[in-house]
Amino acid sequence: MRKRKYSILTKVGIFYLLFTLLSFLVTAIILHSEATKHMDNILEERLKQREHWVKILIERRPERVNKKDYATVTPVATIPKAFKPVYKDTVLLHHETGRKEVHRKRINYVTVKDQHYRIEVIKSATELYRFKDDVYEIILPVFIVLALVIILINYLLSGYLFAPFKYILRQMASFNLTRKQAFRQRTTSTTEFYHLQQLFEAMQKRIVNDYEQLKSYTENMSHELQTPLTIMQNKAEHLLSDETLSQQQAEKIKIIYDEVMQLSRLGSLLNLITKIGNEEFTDVKEVYTKPILEQHIQSISDFAANRYIEIKTTLSADHAFKIDTGLLDILIRNLLKNAVSYANSDSVIYIETTSSAFTISNEGPELEFDAATIFNRFTKGKNSKSLGLGLAIVKQICQISKLNISYQRTNGRHVFSIEEKTFD
């Protein structure tokens, strides 16, 4: 499965939202901590004040001390050593509201008129906890509103701010060497997009210039080579027809003739590979393969019959490729020639098409090289007279035509399968 892609503005928006959320949380924690300290200090002062009034009551009117609902006084024999006041939160029924609320309790020991007392005073802490809740209740809605605003701005700006960038991408995607269309710049006030346009235009000019020089060199070289090769071929044919030649001389001239033919074929194939790589075949359309396969099978049937090879087909009338017709001819011709050339004598070649796939298989000996390199240029067996370019051309055609080609050896057969690429 392909990993999902996101625009840069979306990523920036997500990172900004995460950073904002983190900032809000840190702020809320700091506010919560400071508010807690502040309210704790206020409660502590109020509890100390109540404790002070309790001590005064003990001195002046001890009979009224335990009548206060906010204090409990208990005489004790001794005071624990090094005792410090203890604070506890507890839920009690509020005497005014009649509801259960959180109260802060202070426990301390005091001495009044040589008598030791354990004093518990309480104070409602509801305001403290309500304030703590309010911190998050205020910050959370603010963050949600800010997040929605950021998402909305991201959506609106993605079409406006990145319009020049998307335009440049479309220009890049439509760039083709053979059409030689001029790059049309788009006015933009964004420095990065302006420099990107300048860079792409300069790069396009360099690519076109290099392509023209390479194409001119290749065509000139191919043309210039064909002339001496044709002369050598004609001379070799003339010498082979000379009856005065000895058998040994005739064999040597035949070797020269074969090598000249190989050079001529090599030049033509390399020129073809260059044209395919430069995407000079642009007549792409949906082509049904059945009639073309039948035509090529008929053309190669005599060659197959000479080696006692039978070709069996199961062809679907619905099978089609989106491909240049010239490239499809080259692809089928090379696969058929490869299958017949390397098939065992007195064997069967199977060709099958379904609504989505094309398969050709032949019975043949094991490969003399790694199967992973079968589509590489100049890959061939040790004793093969082939140039090793046929399957490389097939692979290159499949690549530029968005087709998947695969090879496997199954039950003693070499199987090539071609399917259209699928995108997740």
Image: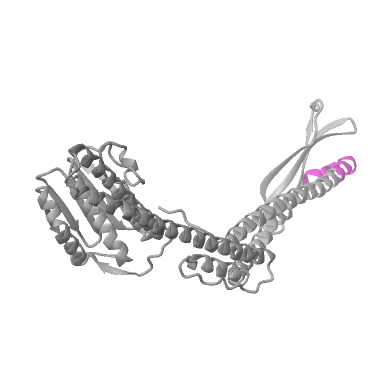
Please tell me whether residue 285 is drawn above or below residue 105 in the rendered image.
below
Please tell me whether residue 297 is drawn above or below residue 88 in the rendered image.
below
Name the residue at 31% across, 51% down: 232
Name the residue at 67% across, 49% down: 92
Residue 126 in view: no
Residue 245 in the image, given as x and y percentages of width and height: 20, 42
> Would you say the magenta stretch is mainly helix, strand or loop?
helix
Residue 48 in the image, given as x and y percentages of width and height: 84, 44
- The residues colored magenta run 52-67
Question: For residue 121: magenta?
Answer: no
Q: Quadrant of the C terminus?
A: bottom left
Left or right: 79 in relation to 126: right
Residue 113 in the image, given as x and y percentages of width and height: 90, 33
User: Along the line of sight, which residue is nearer the eye, 368 or 99?
Assistant: 368
User: Along the line of sight, which residue is nearer the eye, 107 or 42?
Assistant: 42
Left or right: 213 in relation to 305: right
Please tell me whether residue 159 is drawn above or below residue 241 in the rendered image.
below
Residue 404 in the image, given as x and y percentages of width and height: 33, 54
Left or right: 327 in relation to 4: left
Q: How is the image coloured?
A: one colour
